[in-house]
Amino acid sequence: MLVDATLLIQDVQLLCFTIVFGVLAWQRWRDGTRRWLWYSFLANAAGAVFDLLGDRLPNWINHGVNLEMIALSYVLINVALYYFGGRGKKLVWASFAIVFATLPVFLAWSNHPSQVRSFALGDFVIGLECLVTTAMLLGGTERSTKAPRLLMGGFLAVFVLVEFARFCVAFLLNADPDAFSHKLEVTSAVAYIVNTSLLPLAFIWMMNARLESDLVQQTIVDPLTNVLNRRGLEQALERELAHYRRHGNDLTVAILDLDRFKQLNDAYGHVAGDTVLVGLATLLGRRLRATDVIGRFGGEEFVLILPGTDGSASGPLLDELCIAMRENSFAFLNTTLRATASFGVTTTRGRKTIAATELLHEADVALYRAKNNGRDQVCFFTPAEPAPGLFVTPRQGLHTNSDAKHGR
């Protein structure tokens, strides 16, 4: 009786969630995740209607097709997860195969006077589908959705154990799971209610977590070059300085500036300039380590942060970058564009109290020396140069490619 009452509550919940997710899918119909999630609740809603109509339906529907509805809903949830994460296609096909393979059994047993084994087989199929869902959730690698995936996957693992326990009681002990143990009956009832509530809420949590992560990324990533923007660079530099103060491994900061970028813009247009900026960001990404930080600080200025690297280690690397930039070409329409860059570099040199603004100022001073010495070279800051001060020079303000008005 408890499980029957629980199923009634579950059916009402499913009908409500069907309406809610139907509205969400309608608002963004091209979103495959929302659309297939709604299809999942439609399958559940169909099962709920079959439950409410009960004996008014023919046995092949009420005791045959109906027992596949919840399992089918998990198949459609797996499709939604595939659209959400872009992986698990083979698992989706496996979940479809499970449903289609067991449907003939349910239809063959639909007229059996006792439906205990039919219901238990239904529990087993649901458990198998939940295993597939759990594998897809726990197999994901997206950091922003890790918490809801772990929560949902962890509960489903427990839910699978409950479903398999009911199957074993019916087939191995030849008993009705709801009459065999009051604890199993209560556990099943609670698991059903929590499952109906947790799955949709966890999906909403996952979608919101990804949206929030995307919004955060938009505030720290340059949309043209797909490297960090000024805000992202400032955060990264403070983070690396904190790590340096804890562990003592020197840190290198370099500012590189494209030479005569204004002339390139004037000669070929700003779209050509953008092509060079994107190409430079790609070149830097290929040449530097995964732990290094690349950011666009201004129109044609980039900042490189090389953790755990002193001057003796960063010098050859930056020289190689300067040469690679000199030898590289960028295809634009029917033209081959070339550009060089000047590098201004500084290191922490064991100074635990040095601030981010001081490092950037020192690199900027070295960059001016590289420009004055003929461009297309790497210059390191030396203590004999002007003492570092507040890093607020006008040319370091954030500006776009089209705002570049100097011809360095």
Image: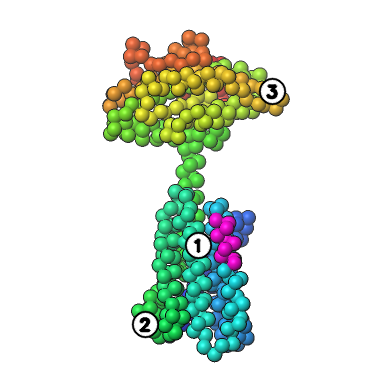
Query: Could you tell me residue 211's position as x and y percent?
Result: 50, 50
Q: Main secondary structure of the magenta part?
A: helix
Callout 1 crowding tier (Cα within 10 Å): few <14, some 14–19, many ≥20: many
Q: Nearer the viewer, residue 155 or 54?
A: 155
Q: Nearer the viewer, mark 2 or mark 3?
A: 2
Disc on res. 189: none
Which segment did they paint magenta? 88-97
Callout 2 crowding tier (Cα within 10 Å): few <14, some 14–19, many ≥20: few
Left or right of 335? Residue 346 is: left
CB under 8 Å between discs 2 and 3 = no
Q: Nearer the viewer, residue 408 or 156?
A: 156
Residue 90 lies in magenta, yes or no?
yes
Between the residue at mark 2 and the residue at mark 3, the CA separation in whole angstroms equals 79 Å
For marks 2 and 1 on the same chain, the one whose residue lies earlier in the sequence: 1
Q: In the rendered image, is residue 296 in sight?
A: no
Between the residue at mark 2 and the residue at mark 1, the CA separation in whole angstroms equals 28 Å
Residue 326 lies in magenta, yes or no?
no
Q: Secondary structure at mark 1?
A: helix
Amino acid at dot 1 = Thr
Disc on res. 335: 3
Callout 3 crowding tier (Cα within 10 Å): few <14, some 14–19, many ≥20: few
Seen in the picture, residue 144 relative to 163 is either above or below; the reply is above
Q: Which residue is mark 1?
A: 133
Residue at 44% in and 65% down = 156
Amino acid at dot 3 = Thr
Residue that lies at the very extreme toward the front in this rendered image = 172
Residue at 44% in and 27% down = 304
CB under 8 Å between discs 2 and 1 = no
CB under 8 Å between discs 1 and 3 = no
When asked about the image quadrant of residue 151, the answer is bottom left
When asked about the image quadrant of residue 38, the answer is bottom right
